[in-house]
């Protein structure tokens, strides 16, 4: 069967010569599907060889595979209640955990859920901290070493966002769900925590903050027990946003060398673990998130109404 030809978009910007080792000069961003309201949370399912991603306003998870294209995988995805909830009621961040389950950040149901991909319904991993419901869990990552989940909880899924009367917690926190199910607040001083990912050795947690007044990526040490230590600034992109580049720090993934591939002002930013901007994938559309797929060298990107991919010369951490 002949290789399908996809339309392309975007432009590669080389901020540092070393970026050519990660993305060759002839790299192209392919558009695989379009027409979504706000695509988010891409994750590659290795066994089935397909991509899952959220359309948050539509309350759906879609499936995309090379041979058959696009289909609805799950509906509803994040809000199972009656009536109108908000403009972003569905699932947001998604991962496949070490047990092969789909872990979802659910805006409308305000929880982290787990669902087997074979048979069986969802179970709630966490929906509150100390009796107070979460705002709208946004992104999640599993720590392989201490077998726990870490997630962010900004207000984007609430009907009136930070001013919503149904808010129960004053904190936009970063939380941990331990192996025994206990929930703990790990970071409480970020204004808009969003995407997060671990370094290849699991000893550093990176958190993106989607605040236009402080568009930053932070790094935090992770101790052997899973506790998060004091953070430090990794990279500040506030000036890029102020200069008119649309978008904010959002979803991110890590490659095998520890580089961050993150959505941000202008599209995707690739930042070294030392905090140096190596390059950018300029999309000219609001870019939300990304995920490694195929053999680990293809980066899938959710870009507003589009789902895209680009072939790299590296691989995701853990592939």
Image (tube, rainbow, N blue to C red):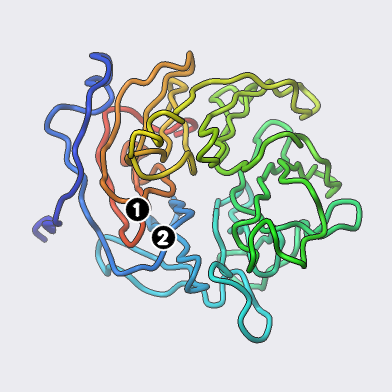
Crowd rating for badge 1 (residues with CA inside 10 Å; few <14, some 14–19, many 20+)? many
Q: Classify 6 as above or below 26.
A: below
Residue in the image at 85% along x and 52% along y: 129
Question: What secondary structure is marked by label 1?
Answer: strand
State the image quarter where residue 81 is shown. bottom right
Residue in the image at 44% along x and 47% along y: 289
Residue in the image at 83% along x and 49% along y: 181
Percent from the top left, x then y, of residue 24?
18, 27
Screen quadrant of the N terminus: bottom left
User: Which residue is the extreme one toward the right?
Assistant: 130
Q: Are marks 2 and 1 in contact (CB under 8 Å)?
A: yes
Q: Left or right: 276 with respect to 154?
A: left
Residue in the image at 35% along x and 38% along y: 268
Question: What secondary structure is marked by label 2?
Answer: strand
User: Which residue is the extreme one toward the bottom?
Assistant: 83
Q: Which mark is residue 147?
A: none
Percent from the top left, x then y, of residue 259?
43, 24
The residue beneath circle 2 is 39
Q: CA distance from mark 2 to mark 1?
A: 7 Å
Q: Classify 275 as above or below 132.
A: above
State the image quarter where residue 295 is shown. top left
């Amino acid at each position: 069967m002949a290789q399908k030809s996809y339309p392309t978009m975007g432009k590669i910007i080389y901020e540092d010569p070393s970026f050519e080792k990660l993305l060759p000069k002839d790299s192209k961003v392919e558009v695989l599907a379009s027409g979504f309201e706000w695509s988010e949370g891409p994750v590659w399912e290795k066994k089935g060889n397909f991509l899952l991603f959220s359309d948050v306003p539509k309350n759906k998870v879609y499936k995309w595979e090379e041979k058959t294209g696009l289909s609805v995988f799950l509906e509803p995805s994040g809000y199972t209640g009656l009536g109108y909830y908000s403009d972003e009621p569905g699932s947001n961040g998604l991962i496949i955990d070490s047990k092969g389950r789909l872990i979802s950040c659910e805006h409308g149901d305000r929880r982290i859920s787990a669902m087997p991909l074979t048979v069986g319904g969802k179970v709630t991993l966490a929906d509150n901290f100390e009796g107070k419901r979460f705002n709208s869990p946004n992104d999640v990552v599993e720590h392989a070493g201490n077998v726990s989940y870490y997630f962010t909880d900004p207000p984007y899924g609430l009907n009136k966002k930070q001013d919503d009367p149904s808010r129960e917690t004053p904190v936009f926190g970063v939380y941990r769900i331990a192996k025994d199910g206990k929930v703990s607040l790990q970071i409480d001083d970020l204004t808009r925590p969003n995407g997060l990912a671990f370094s290849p050795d699991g000893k550093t947690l990176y958190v993106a903050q989607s605040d236009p007044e402080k568009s930053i990526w932070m790094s935090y040490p992770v101790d052997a027990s899973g506790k998060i230590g004091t953070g430090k600034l990794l990279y500040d992109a506030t000036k890029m946003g102020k200069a008119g580049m649309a978008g904010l720090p959002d979803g991110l993934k890590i490659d095998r060398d520890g580089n961050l591939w993150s959505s941000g002002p202008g599209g995707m930013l690739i930042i070294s673990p030392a905090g140096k901007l190596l390059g950018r994938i300029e999309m000219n559309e609001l870019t939300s998130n990304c995920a490694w797929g195929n053999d680990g060298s293809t980066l899938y990107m959710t870009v507003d109404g589009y789902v895209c991919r680009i072939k790299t010369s590296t691989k995701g951490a853990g592939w």
